[in-house]
Amino acid sequence: MTHDLTRRGFLAASAALAATTALPRMSFAQSAPLSLTATSRVIEVGGRAASVMGLTNGLGGQGLILDPGQRFRVDLTNTLAEETIIHWHGQIPPNVQDGVPNLPMPLLQPGETRSYDYAPMPGTYWMHSHVPVQEMSLLAAPLIVRRPEDLTSDRQEVVMFLHDFSFRPAAEVLAEITQGAAHHDMGAMDAPAPTPDGMSGMNHSGMTTDGTGHMGMAMGGMGAGGMVMDLNDFEFDAYLANDRTLADPEVIAVERKGLVLLRVINAAAATVFWIDTGGVPARLVAVDGHGVTPVTGTRFGLAMAQRLDLEIDLPDAGAFPILALREGARQRTGIILATAGAEVRRIDDLAEVESSAFDLDLAQERLLRAAPVVGAPTLAPRPVDRTHMIMLGGAMQPYLWTINGQVWGNHTPLTAKTGERVHLSFHNMSMMGHPMHLHGHVFQVVNINGQTFDGAIRDTVYVPPMSMVTVALDAGEAARWMLHCHHMPHLSIGMMTEFAVSA
């Protein structure tokens, strides 16, 4: 099988061989399973060596890229000194391959290899340990499944993989947070309370239209309010983009006036980011691997476990920072896109001002409309067979986060039958936002605070404080599928239930 490459595609592929964001492109004529190893590794953070975990491919890099139509045939080997299990986030493998401890498969023992084989969905995905302390130790990596147009489009692909990082052992960090002893970020105490229609007085003066009705996301400041919120559980030592800080960012060679497809993955344990493209407008074209009607802007929010695909038309020449700003704080990280010979200036890892809270009124989510592409899942209109109301609750003191007033192990499953159209209505009654992830399914956002619309197709939806978000899905394989908050300390304390599908 042959494929034509454009000049820019050839340049991008050539440059990718030396870039840490360059994931190995596996051959179409794959005759043997790909290898993936859960292992320990050492990175440099702020000039200090740091021991972390990782998912190493057969070429020694982190993560995988699959070509269009290629099966996910992978042999996963655990070379860690402890048990682990890997979840293929956003993909829909058979339940037995989903990667949750003992549901149904046990953890991989040290030295054990386990095989996986399923037909993956195209788009921007990732893979991570389903053991919270291991995900906090960077046991995660990109999983990119290309569409045919990704091979023929005259654009360069770049991956931006985000983490929050502590030099302290993850178990120690998690214990401090969950025992309520951590320093809680009170910098967003004045974040506004959503009004009854869910709108919190956000200044929309930065919104723009591009002539087609698409609205930009260059948002202004937040309005006044008095709701007491906690945006951040812990002061991490660093925030990483592709394993690096802004003290030594990854500089990616790009063409003058080139087109870049930036795949941004928030793999952080407990940090929401704003993705800021500076003065270079971007088009948001996909979320969680699924196409949306393009939205133009320079700043887009990204909760834990979510992904954004941004198309960026670069100016003639220069260095173009793409920054990830920690929600409600000054910390930031990022990468730099640079044309040949461009001056790359040092960027401080602390911004001059704190960023705002993310999407308290769900303004960004309200803009998104599904734009299905060939080969991607869709949800055709049909009557709803079953509805579940899901109450999200909890507090910082004592540190306890619940689903329907229960924690994992004392939970009541949500039930459905294969093929049923199901609505899950999340009601967040707590003062923290919760990125809610459902295994084994994709869903469509269909209602926000009483407003019905045909929103984005997702696998992880962010539900801010005192908000209601309803998603629609078709119940899949008869099995036990996890539904949980993707804030790792919340998950570890038991903010998880199951979506039990019967035949």
Image (cartoon, helix red, strand yellow):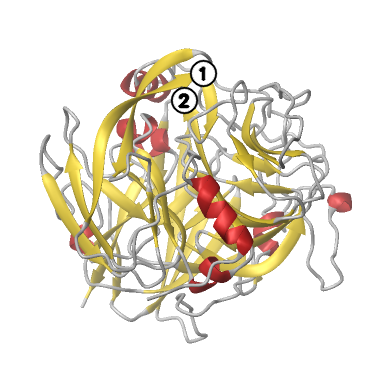
Q: Is residue 75 left or right of residue 112?
A: right
Q: Earlier in the sequence, mark 2 or mark 1?
A: 2
Circle 2/circle 1 CB separation < 8 Å: yes
Callout 2: SS: strand
| Residue 264 locus on image (x, y percent) | 56, 48
Q: Which mark is residue 378?
A: none
Give the alpha-carbon distance from disc 2 to disc 1, as whole Å: 6 Å
Q: Is residue 469 above or below residue 255?
A: below
At 58% from the left and 33% from the top, the residue drawn is 250
Q: Is residue 461 above or below residue 421?
A: above
Residue type at the position of mark 2: Phe
Which quadrant holds residue 38? top left
Q: Is residue 52 left or right of residue 364?
A: left
Q: Quadrant of the C terminus?
A: bottom left
Q: Which residue is mark 2?
A: 165
Q: Is residue 79 left or right of residue 205?
A: left
Q: Quadrant of the N terminus?
A: bottom left
Q: Is residue 52 above or below residue 34?
A: above
Callout 1: SS: loop
Residue type at the position of mark 1: Asp
**Mark 2 residue crowding within 10 angstroms, few (<14) / some (14–19) / many (20+):** many
Q: Is residue 26 above or below residue 446?
A: above
Between 495 and 46, the one lying in front of the other is 46
| Residue 362 locus on image (x, y percent) | 67, 54
Q: Which mark is residue 237?
A: 1
